[in-house]
Amino acid sequence: MLSTVLGRRAPFFLSLLAGMALWEIVGRNTSPAFMVPLSETLVRFWQLVDSGQFGAQFLDSAKLFLTGLVLALVVGMPFGMLLARVQSLRTALEPYIMVLYATPMVALIPFILSIMGFGFTPKVLVVFLFAVFPVLYNTVEGARSIKPEMIEVARSFRSSEWALWREVMVPYTLPFTMTGVRQAIGRGLVGMVAAEFFLSSTGLGQLIMSSSQNFDTSGVLAMILMIGLIGVGLMRVGQMIENHFARWRV
Amino acid sequence: MAETNASIVMPSAVKPATRTNRTGGFLLPRVLAGFGIMLVWEVVVRLTAPAYVAKPSGIVLVIPKVLVDPKFLEATVQTLGAVAQGLLIALALGTVIGLLIGRSATMERMLRHYINGFYAVPMIVILPLVTLWFGYTSAARLATIVFAAIFSIIINVADGARAVPREFLEVAASFRSGRLRTMIDIVLPASTPYFLAGLRLAAGRALIGAVVAEFFAAIGGLGYFILYKSRIFQHNEAFVGVLLLAAFGVGFEVLIGGSTRRFLPWYRRDEKAD
């Protein structure tokens, strides 16, 4: 039993070790302006954590990310559900939501910068814009795939509007919305870093920028590694949320 | 991974609805809604915002001027050229790696977590590193585009290669088809719908990557055009650039969704629902 688990896990650990070794070797054999060994990156990361810089900037970024994401959910979910139920509204607005979903929202950052300036609000707006359309788009997409028979059956049993929402609309569209929420988490993270890069420099984005301006390659790599791990962790969370709500869709 | 599933669901789920929509004459409410949105935008900007802020009437007036502006055309060519080039590189590399991962359990166990990990990294954080490596040049933009695009292609191609029906492979094996032959003639065509779904995601991400790199490194292109024009308070002109980017984003979606339906009519996701 133990040996089979090891056998299955071995390639994973071996490749992880190989990756780390590769990083170390490449780092040691190139100019430190380009690449720094893993060991040095980890030391630098520990310095950033130890000096309290990382913690403070992390909290700053987390505040921005969560505010934007929560706003996107609070606006996106009810509006999406409304579109789900009111068919005429949905047919009218659907193409515009699709267009906004496919538009690279980064392109709006220069406008936000020159109209709203450098405060916290414009940055939240950026995260919100990145995150809200996946939620809306997927909710509408879900609503569109409700079989009309379901609603007809509910109607012919004289279901009230409230019961129709509670028993058919919400349970049916929620898994689709959650797919949107997972995408929104990923996009929101990009929005967060974009806001920190291109609007006022704060948070983890600022930490990368200042490392890069000081030609502190190990600092840049340490931050990329960290934000990457945060990204992986958030993706996992999003996946769990989606799976939890999509149980019946199997 | 589930992003792939979601994106594959869409074309087939959209299909029946759009058909009835087209015959049902939903054009009128859509056009009306469009005018409504523009009217609200126009009124809000006129009442509350400074004069330089983009508004529909202003944008419509500058469109003819911007579209013949050689600087704008050059920027468009630069950005789209870089996106096309980056996508080609990502496609070539991504397909090979994806097929390897999809058809070899060892490769899968060795590389999967790296691919998923890189895919989850918000692509924008690599910009400082990329500019460190390639300088503030168009090579930095190309690298960003490839990084942004390649992982969704790898993941989707691998999923597709894994979903090839076993009977196909058994028939190939019993006719003593070689490994490479089976890959090219059976696995690759059978995973085309997944490949297209990956390409669709990749194209959107590549466009974002290009714009972000242009902002960051001040490389000439549509993104930089938008940045520059909005800095000199010509928001209407800048917004034409945004419209063009949106058109490309939507164009990719429609093109790939349409070609899946047109050229791969045999593909029905519900038939091989997992």
Image: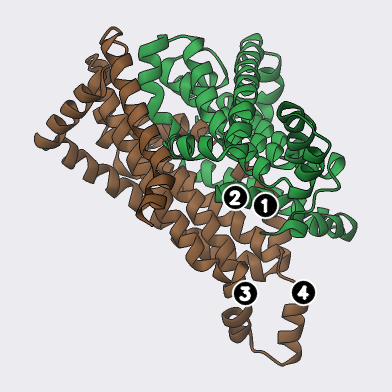
Chain colours: A brown, B green
Give the image location of residue A41, x and y in percent: 23, 25
In the rendered structure, the residue with mark 1 lies on which chain?
B
Q: Please identify the quarter of the rendering in which residue B82 is found.
A: top right
Percent of width and height locating residue A109: 45, 33
Q: Secondary structure at mark 4?
A: helix
Identify the secondary structure beneath mark 2: helix
Taking the image as drawn, is residue A226 in sight?
yes
Q: Nearer the viewer, mark 3 or mark 2?
A: 3
Q: Residue at x 26, y 24 (%)?
A: A38
Q: CA distance from mark 4 to mark 1?
A: 29 Å
Looking at the image, is mark 4 or mark 1 nearer the viewer?
4
Q: Residues within 10 Å of mark 1 (few under 14, many from 20)?
A: few
- Labels 1 and 2 touching (C-beta < 8 A): yes
The disc at residue A148 is 4
Mark 3 sits on what residue? A169
- Both on one chain, marks 4 and 1? no
Q: Which mark is residue A136?
A: none
The amino acid sitting under disc 4 is Pro
Q: Are marks 2 and 4 in contact (CB under 8 Å)?
A: no
Q: Is residue A229 left or right of residue A173?
A: left
The reply, left or right, for residue B17 in relation to residue A197 is: right
Pointer 1 residue: B36
Q: Quadrant of the C terminus of chain B?
A: bottom right
Image: A99 above or below B223? below
Q: Quadrant of residue A174?
A: bottom right
Amino acid bearing label 2: Val
Q: Nearer the viewer, mark 1 or mark 3?
A: 3
